Image (cartoon, rainbow, N blue to C red):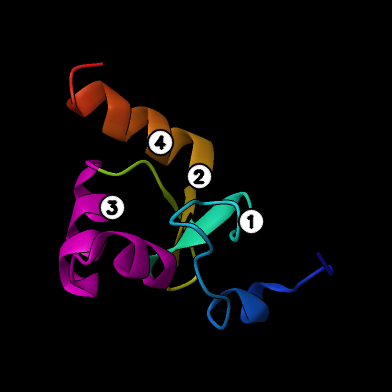
């Protein structure tokens, strides 16, 4: 797979319903495509700490590993 920039992530498709198509940092747009949850709800969850994230400028970035661990913890695994 070719190296991609952050701008390329929004154009990439999800192959086989895995997160392999995404880099180590997910954006709100990535999570919206993966989960079907609205961007507004995802931003609110990031602000409240419900989704582990960091904010750089006006954009939220979610570490893929922390997101997966958070989802698994909340699902009771």
Does 28 sit left or right of 35 as displayed? right
Q: Are marks 1 and 2 in contact (CB under 8 Å)?
A: yes
Q: Which mark is residue 46?
A: 3
Q: Residues within 10 Å of mark 1 (few under 14, many from 20)?
A: some
The residues bearing labels 4 and 1 have C-alpha atoms spaced at a distance of 13 Å
Query: Residue 8: x and y, percent?
Result: 66, 80
Does the magenta segment cover residue 49?
yes
In the displayed orientation, state which residue is furthest to the right.
Answer: 2
Q: Secondary structure at mark 1?
A: loop
Q: Which mark is residue 23?
A: 1
In the foreground, 11 or 16: 16
Q: Is residue 36 above or below residue 7?
A: above
Q: At 58% across and 59% down in the image, what residue appears? A: 22
Please identify, in this view, whether the residue under mark 1 or under mark 3 is nearer the observer: 1
Q: At 53% across and 63% down in the image, what residue appears? A: 15
Q: At 28% across and 34% down in the image, what residue appears? A: 71
What's the magenta region? 29-50
User: Which residue position holds label 2?
Assistant: 64
Q: Secondary structure at mark 3?
A: helix
The residues bearing labels 1 and 2 have C-alpha atoms spaced at a distance of 8 Å
Q: Main secondary structure of the magenta part?
A: helix
The residues bearing labels 4 and 3 have C-alpha atoms spaced at a distance of 14 Å
First-in-chain label (4 vs 3): 3
Query: Residue 4: x and y, percent?
Result: 76, 72
Q: Residues within 10 Å of mark 3 (few under 14, many from 20)?
A: some
């Amino acid at each position: 797979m070719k190296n991609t920039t952050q701008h390329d992530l929004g154009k990439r498709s999800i192959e086989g319903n895995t997160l392999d198509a995404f880099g180590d940092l997910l954006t709100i747009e990535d999570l919206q495509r993966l989960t079907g949850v609205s961007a507004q709800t995802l931003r609110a969850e990031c602000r409240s700490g419900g989704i582990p994230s960091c904010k750089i400028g006006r954009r939220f970035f979610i570490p893929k590993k922390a997101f997966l661990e958070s989802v698994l913890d909340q699902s009771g695994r």
